[in-house]
Amino acid sequence: MLSFLFRLIHDFHAGHGFNPNTLYINTFHYRNLRESVPGLKADADLARFLDVDIILSEESIHPHVAWLIPESRQRAGGRSGG
């Protein structure tokens, strides 16, 4: 599972020129991911390790990544980038 996610992140970066900041994953795949990195105790540790926010969604048949505008920037009407 971990190598699959790293490949998703790499492919996203290759296609967009920047890393994703969000992972959509269902609870089944999330449990498998947690088992593949047993040294990380808290959910926040796993998110920091992958450098993404994790959104659990049963609609996510397969894990996928995206880049979302951080909430604070949306409220301020700002944009990311230059």
Image (tube, helix red, strand yellow):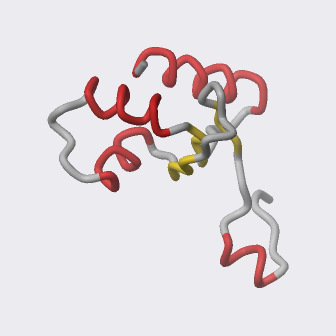
Looking at the rendered image, the quarter that the C terminus falls into is bottom right
Residue 17 in picture, x, y percent from top left: 73, 33
Q: Residue at x 58, y 41 (%)?
A: 23
Q: Report whether 40 appears left or right of 68.
A: left
Q: Residue at x 42, y 35 (%)?
A: 30
Q: Eyeballing the image, is 52 above or below 78?
A: above
Q: Eyeballing the image, is 61 above or below 66?
A: above
Residue 13 in picture, x, y percent from top left: 67, 29
Q: Along the line of sight, which residue is nearer the eye, 10 or 17? A: 10
Residue 75 in picture, x, y percent from top left: 76, 82
Looking at the rendered image, the quarter that the N terminus falls into is top left
Q: Residue at x 72, y 74 (%)?
A: 73
Q: Residue at x 43, y 15 (%)?
A: 3
Q: Report whether 14 appears left or right of 30.
A: right
Looking at the image, the residue that sits furthest to the left is 39
Q: Along the line of sight, which residue is nearer the eye, 62 or 51? A: 62
Residue 18 in picture, x, y percent from top left: 68, 38
Q: Report whether 47 appears left or right of 69.
A: left
Q: Eyeballing the image, is 34 above or below 80?
A: above
